[in-house]
Image (tube, rainbow, N blue to C red):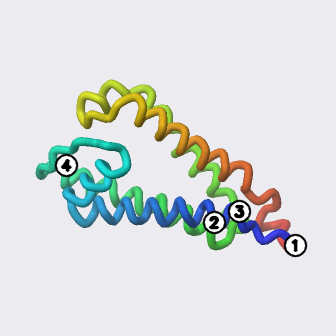
Amino acid sequence: MNHHTGIKALAGFMGVYHVLMGVFGIASGSMAAWAAHALWHANVNVDAQFTYLAKFLGAYVVGFGVMLLFIAKDPVRYGALVYPAIVVGLLRIAERLVFASELKSAFGIGMDRTIGTIIVVGALNLGLFLLRPRETHWSAK
């Protein structure tokens, strides 16, 4: 009997990470800026516009994290959610590449950090894909 321990752990880690990052954004622009600096060495000017956008985007990040926690809770029942999660990961990778010069000019995030983020996001999403349950909710006994 397969209990899907790998995907539960991976989706759980990713879910908690995203919920926390979203809560930081919702809680305060300063917390969001601190997290961005700690993780990506981003230099953020915290003003009213950034603070509002951090709250707005934080809500979506919390939603994404909750989706990943559904996968962690029951990978067979919610296994189809792996695919939208991977799409979001691929979009993040594409954005990092396409807008690398904007990341550098706006936040001081260099290409070394961009490549590092791409590797991490790619590895996490590859893990989701490889660990996804092969059976569906309908065929589960």
Q: CA distance from mark 2 to mark 3?
A: 5 Å
* Quadrant in which the C terminus appears: bottom right
Q: Nearer the viewer, residue 134 or 103?
A: 103
Closer to the chain start, of discs 3 and 4, is 3
> Residue 36 vs residue 114: left or right?
left
Q: Position of residue 14 (x, y in %)?
A: 53, 59
Q: Secondary structure at mark 2?
A: helix
Residue 95 shows in the view: no
Q: Who's the residue at 32% across and 35% down the image?
A: 109
* Tag of residue 50: 4
* Quadrant in which the N terminus appears: bottom right
| Residue underneath mark 3 | 6
> Residue 55 vs residue 87: left or right?
left
- Quick check: marks 3 and 4 in contact, CB under 8 Å? no
Please name which of the two marks, 3 or 1, marks the residue nearer to the observer: 3
| Residue underneath mark 1 | 1
